[in-house]
Image (spheres, rainbow, N blue to C red):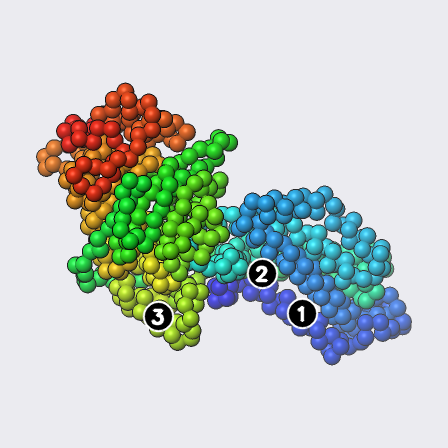
Amino acid sequence: MIKRFFHKPLAVISLVWVVTLLVLSIAAPLIAPYGPDQQDIMHALEGPSAAHPLGTGVLGLDVLSRLLYGGRVTFLSTAISLVAYLSVGTPFGLLAGYRGGLTDKVILRVSDIAYAIPGTVIVLVVLAVRPGDEDAAMIACGLVSAPSLARVVRSATISVREELFIRTAVVSGLSDVHILRKHVLPTVMGTVIVHAALFATAAIGLETGLGFLGVGTRQVTWGQLVAEASKNLGNQPWLLLPSGFIIVTFILAFGLIGDGLRDATAEGYSVRQLPVGRSTVKDGSAAVAATADADFAVAEPLLVVDGLSVAFDIAGRPTTVVAGVSFSLRPGEIVGVVGESGSGKSVTIAAMLGLLKGTGRVTSGTMRYGDRDYELSDVKSLAALRGGRVALIGQDPMSALDPVFTVRYQLAEVIRTHTDLKGAAVDARIIELLQAVRLPDPELVARSYPYQLSGGMAQRVSIAAALAGEPEVILADEPTTALDVTVQAEILDVLRALGKTVVLVTHDWGVLVDLAERAVVLYAGQVVEQGSIADIVGDPKHPYTMALLRSNPYFAAPGRPLPAISGAVLPPQDWPAGCHFADRCPLAHPECATAPVPLVVTTGRAGVTRCLFPEDVSGMEGVSA
């Protein structure tokens, strides 16, 4: 950012001017030709001369010397007020935007109260109680103005909080303080800088105004010089030029510096691609997946989700969007979760990690991990699993990585959080992870920022980040959706070679068949079928599964039109009491809509289906409308 800032000529000139004034003010006792109160009565109210380069005021006080000494007061007062403004407004804004809920409401109400109190009145009251204590007045100014900054930072934080890279940081097990300090704050820093610069100009105006009115400090200030010039405007108009010039250019410079810093921060997101490498290494081993429900259990499971239900407030009413989802996994298995958009796949994954957005909440369900049971409604208890035991790979790799930091930094913070590695061992582990996901030139990638990577490379880095905490289970939420088919194949090779327990969410039967041997089919928030991939593809026992297969290009008959499922997934508030697929099902009977359809074990194989007539599915006619 610093290099980009120095490519802004106006901002650089402004910075030089402010620094020059600061240095001259600090050095005033050494370089000022006279003391701030040293009189030369014989040369009062004179213009510039050899003895007094900027002229004299009343009683022959040297204008140049008083400007230098006055700058000390102005700089200090502005700095004091700015520190109070930033130290209160920024953290409370971050906290309100990030935590939301009661914390957000309390901070907003306090801000409303602060807004109702005129800031100028507070400053004058402070000066009335502590006459001449300008420092106290400027602190009061900063504190009274801080709620406005808090509101702005809150709004920016709310937007950033929804970014996938923040969710990835949460899943990685990083603390809220670390996430706020290292990921949220740098992202909203441009907003903070602009408002800090604007407030600094206002603080300078206030300080000079107090000096002009004569209610501030008894020391010489630029405001006092303006007041003196205004009183003697008829006798010596020159007096207004030096002090007016200093104040105007000082305020303008602060504004330009803020603009330059904001632009330099924003330009940090410009895109430059690295050469794209392609992996040629393949591992033929494929983990065997498993599936479970209330009526179908997996032996010695590592993870069991039982009866997960999730609700969101829709039109002001609690509405169930995931209803009683259950499945299990054994160590090293890959379970595929498949279904149309709106089926509840991503919501299920988010609920397992305590990452539901907005009004989403778990209304029932538990998760057994190893030898411990977790209430899925207890978000705090799930935090212990994130990153170190359960990791997430998202579908948008560019959003999953923080654009502000290098790949090395982002991998290192996860490694340090979940392992005891330090120093050189962390760097060695980073290179090892990047090699494990088959990235060419891992040293170069480690030094790169996410926006310098291609989509396939970024997804590999996301996988490396998921592995950095050495988790046992990986939740992969459509990890190949945003990638072209060639890169998809490479990513699938990487996932296959990990040897981890994986829950793979996908729309793509081809991906599912390639990686998993068991699948969970979701429709409208319910599990409608579970079983081995071979059984489900070869002999599905639910009409929705059959319809999905027939409408998938991988299984289309050559020379025949591709069938499509009629209608669309009903919104949750319109789900019927009976089978959720009944309005789209060619096999629907009147009894399908009268009562909830239970999951039943499929005949002759290990699996379950939520259909009253599973034996009729194999003879089901086309699914087109």
Q: Are marks 1 and 2 in contact (CB under 8 Å)?
A: no
Q: Residues within 10 Å of mark 3 (few under 14, many from 20)?
A: some
- Residue 206 placement (x, y as % from top left): 74, 55
In the foreground, 9 or 239: 9
Label 1: which secondary element: helix
Give the residue at mark 3: 429
In the foreground, 134 or 346: 346
Image position of 208 with respect to 102: above or below: below
- Earlier-in-chain disc, 3 versus 2: 2
Residue most extreme to the top: 590
- Earlier-in-chain disc, 1 versus 2: 1
- Residue 68 placement (x, y as % from top left): 74, 70
* Residue 257 marker: 2
Give the residue at mark 1: 22
Q: CA distance from mark 3 to mark 2?
A: 41 Å
Residue at x 37% of width, y 41% of height? 307
**What amino acid is labelled 2 in the image?**
Ile
Q: Is residue 473 left or right of residue 619?
A: right
Q: CA distance from mark 1 to mark 2?
A: 15 Å
Within the image, what quadrant is residue 70 found in? bottom right
